[in-house]
Amino acid sequence: MPRFDFIRAEPRWQAEWDARGCFRVADVPTDGKPKYYVLEMFPYPSGKIHMGHVRNYTLGDVVARYKRARGFAVMHPMGWDAFGLPAENAARERNIHPAKWTWENIANMRGELQRMGLSLDWTREFATCDPAYYGHQQKLFLDFLAAGLVARRESWVNWDPVDGTVLANEQVIDGRGWRSGALVEKKLLSQWVFKITDYAQDLLAALDGLERWPERVRLMQANWIGRSEGARVRFALETPVDGVAEVEVYTTRPDTLYGMSFLAVAPEHPLAEAAGARHAAAAEFIAECRRMGTSEAVIETMEKRGFDTGLRVKHPFIEGATFPVWIANFVLMEYGTGAIFGCPAHDQRDLDFARKYDLSVLPVVLPAGEDAAAFAVDNKAFDGTGVIINSGFLDGLQAPDAAKRTVIAELESRGIGEGVVNWRLRDWGVSRQRYWGCPIPVIHCDDCGVVAVPDSELPLKLPEDVTFDRPGNPLDHHPTWKHVNCPSCGKAAQRETDTFDTFVDSSWYFARFCSPGSANVVDRAAVDHWMPVDQYIGGIEHAILHLLYSRFVSRAMQKTGHLGTDEPFAGLFTQGMVTHESYRVGTGGNGTWLYPEEIEKRADGTTVRRDTGEAVTVGRVEAMSKSKRNTVDPGSIISRFGADTARWFILSDNPPERDMEWTEAGALGAYRFTQRLFRLAENAALAADGALPETFGTAARSLRRATHRSIQTVTEALEGFNFNVAVARVYELSNAIGEAEKASAGADAAGLDWARREAVGVAAQLISPMMPHLAEEIYSRLHPGSSTIVAELAWPEADASLAAAELVTIAVQVLGKLRATVSLPPGSAEADVIAAAEADPNVARLLEGKRIVKRVYVPNRIVNFVIAG
RNA sequence: GCCCGCCUGGCGGAAUGGUAGACGCAGCGGACUUAAAAUCCGCAGUCGCAAGGCGUGCCGGUUCGAGUCCGGCGGCGGGCACCA
């Protein structure tokens, strides 16, 4: 029996596509075709591709191949997000240079990706660690600097004094550095920031226009940007301290000012520091707060605590009333002004705080239906709408809106506050104290300050001769690299030794892909042609930072003349994770995780360790991870089953936006289908290749209907990103081909043969975005000697008249319950359908002696008799 | 704590407000085979001999008709920088 020999066929077709240049496009095409830019998030070259990559790049490849068949000039590039910490970790742990480690990984992963048969334009490939890329990034930064989009600012960071490095929140575990175990201290560092907050309003407003983005991603970004309307209010200190006479707070609820019971400042607030300087106890409390991690988990469980400074502030409206000033661990220095006023009755956190420290609680918003005299707040703050009470000139106003407007007007007229719009978004700090990143191209001169590295010296390359044998940044330790003369005055000066956050690298790579060989940052004609990306595909984990930074950088590039568009990604699709069962032997501390290939599933339903026969506990399905060893290596799957099988299974299992579970059985099932379809095609190819018959018999007509319907349904499914449904429709077509194979043709042999060849040819085209090698293999056998390949064919068109059903089944309901079905030609007259429905014995029985109140009729769908009596 | 998403057979899932469970996986029965694999045929939500009930997390509503729309509740998952 002939088999689909993927081992030979897949490389052969890959070579054929490559030889024909099927997937290459020009930087500035002149073919007049509409453009379509498909991009998947480029990979970090960790060493091997994983199933998440296979899923990501398969999804993108389906889109790219489908759009190409629909007549678009498709740009589908690939590159490497090649700077980052793992390379430095490898250098420290295994004494291998980050560049060598990275380039070797790239070579390996490129080979693995190429085995997948992706329709990529490899001539556009680049790696961000290549000076040919990052030199342009340096130029971009200098342009941003000149355009006022960059600032130098002090900000608090987690500092590991042993590793001499800044730590992310997730690298701080119980207040200690993850690697060194040293107690982390908060440190104020001077850093470069991109002024993303200048674009906060625009980044928020433009979300509405991103119609082909998932709603939840837009929502997450909107929440992240966090626009709020409130007021700044200045409270006079009863007694000025260190010359400071007032404290400014930001609040979204100025309408509840009369419900104030305290004022609280962040531990980093100047007033807190002043208190710390005065009282040892305050200093101790502040120090304690600084040791507190800022990660979510810590904050979740953190007790709300405070320290009473003994200072008091005057209420802005109530003559003679004063309130205590506390330092509180839940007030953030980065948000608003770093100080709040507490209104316990209408804010849960403030209420918890007030109850803990026995502070006053006065309700000032009365919920509808409550009595003002009796209303009290117990342990549940009321944050809904209502009417203002206990509030002087605000009494009787609707809260929050009307009261907010009135109180802001009053604050402004008294000159002690004003209405403001506040943002949650903070500027983007881009400085990193690392070696393996893009050097920030500035020089610090004692006389001239910050001086840009001259364009003529770009790219400013990383020195190669670095050592990782001591803590800190190797760039900083390098004996000569940082010592230069100031380009402006010529005196001895020092290079910046910080490198860029790798998010900078990935915030403009999509633009560079349009003209990867350009001597400029980008070729303006190329980006004008190709940008924006029409379909971007990647993981939901990048929903906020990467996508928001890219949106900002696109705007910055627009401002500096590099781009004509502000939004980089017109369409976004976020895929789910790839998961797998986990396997474990032993329990507790003695337990060991096993790789899937180390276990065996027995027919009796038990799972055992392959080599020892030990019982294995099958764990819950979770994201593939090295620590759980529940990983499946794409390379070995492709070797065993072929790329098409891997692609097909990953598409068939479930909707692409959901998490999918990789199972051996599923992969096997997909493999069997490749063989079944190949066999059906081979049999059809052997049938007589005659002229189009004049007439077709029943079986042939039925197959042609399935063929043309499947063109409609697969196309629809692909357009809607419902790839699992597209797969199901192909299964239906293959089942119909199987039926036709078994049908006794008799006099209709010629028609049936013709219909089978047609069906198989269509099937090859319909699977081609998903299983491109098998598609070519089938097509070439159907058309021996032809030089046409599927990758160059136009997408098939359905003949609607052939696709139409000869009979439709119409449901007959009585009082909304299904009681029968009737089959009639589509488009039958209402009277005929109702007559047929009433003639059904079961329906007739139910209608007998009853009065028909109403007949609901939906053409080709349903009849519903509503009866009474 | 806040925000978001999801919940349909043994499993993954399908279903413009119109026959719930397409298609696949796993399963069961059969054919072929010395045997196995592969392949092919058939069965299959659930209760019931059947007629007929009951079924899309739970409760209620709108509708001739609800998996789908609305209100409430529950569970699971994800995000987060306590956002005042």
Image (cartoon, rainbow, N blue to C red):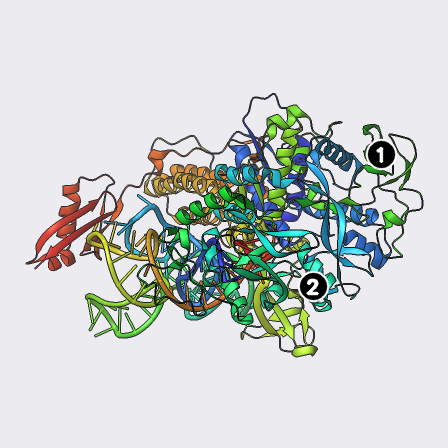
Residue furthest to the front: A320
The residue where tag 2 is placed is: A286
Residue A3 visible? The answer is no
Crowd around label 1: few <14 · some 14–19 · many ≥20 (10 Å): some
**Residue A665 at what x, y percent from top left?**
55, 61
What amino acid type should be assigned to the residue bearing mark 1?
A: Cys
Q: Nearer the viewer, residue A433 or A466?
A: A433
Is residue A525 visible in the rendered image? The answer is yes
Q: Residue at x 17, y 41 (%)?
A: A830
Residue drawn at the location 14% of the way across and 57% of the way down? A841
Q: Dot 1 corresponds to which residue?
A: A448
Left or right: A253 in relation to A277: left
**Which mark sits nearer the N-terminus, 2 or 1?**
2
Indicate whether A851 appears above or below A211: below
Q: Which mark is residue A532?
A: none
Q: Nearer the viewer, residue A247 or A770?
A: A247
Question: What element does badge 1 sit on?
Answer: loop
Tell me if mark 2 has few (under 14), some (14-19) or many (20+) residues whose alpha carbon lies within 10 angstroms of its own: many
Contact (Cβ within 8 Å) of mark 2 with mark 1:
no
Q: Does residue A128 appear to the left or right of A800 in the view shown?
A: right
Is A229 left or right of A750, judged from the image as shown?
A: right
- Residue A165 on image: x %, y %: 79, 55
